[in-house]
Amino acid sequence: MAFNNGAALMDALVLSTAAKEPTYGYRITQDVRRIMTVSESTLYPVLRRLQKEGYLETYDQAFAGRNRRYYRLTEAGARALEQYRAEWIEYKKQIDSMLLEGEEQ
């Protein structure tokens, strides 16, 4: 799950957003956009893949006369998120050591 590409970071951000509370795709997109550039057409395949992998589960709820699909973190998703968080701490230490070398941290 190393953060050597944007996919791992995207997965971690999506799981982190869903961990806060069950939420819908557009809201997840808005939350992730605070950190990185992402379109809905990029995000929805990520949501489907994370659901297929058992990290997210979905349910539909009526909203404004139509169904809105909500995403909720599963136990497997919570374990994956904890792994991402642990790896992020190490990854961040390595990046900080290179970028901030010689500077007070």
Image (cartoon, rainbow, N blue to C red):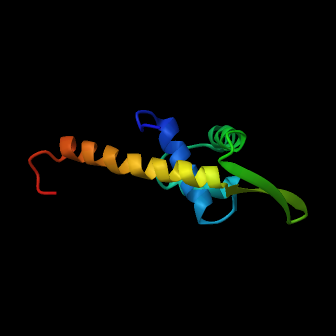
Residue at 40% x, 33% y: name it: 4
Give residue 27's quadrant in the image.
Answer: bottom right
Furthest residue to the left?
102
In this rendering, would 25 be left or right of 33? right
How many numbered badges does the structure rendering display?
0
Q: Can residue 13 be spotted in the picture?
A: no
Q: In this view, does 38 lie to the left or right of 25?
A: left
Q: Which of 87 and 24 is in front in this view?
A: 87
Establish if 68 lies above or below 45. below
Q: Can residue 8 be seen in this view?
A: yes
Depth check, front residue: 14 or 82: 82
Side of 82 where 54 appears, left or right? right
Q: Position of residue 87 (x, y in %)?
A: 39, 46
Quadrant location of the C terminus? bottom left
Q: Position of residue 26 (x, y in %)?
A: 68, 54
Q: Residue furthest right?
A: 65
Between 55 and 103, the one lying in front of the other is 55
Residue 97 is situated, as x and y percent measured from the top left of the image, at 19, 45
Q: In which quarter of the image is residue 23?
A: bottom right
- In the image, what residue occupies the spot 34% across and 51% down? 89
Q: Residue at x 27, y 43 (%)?
A: 95
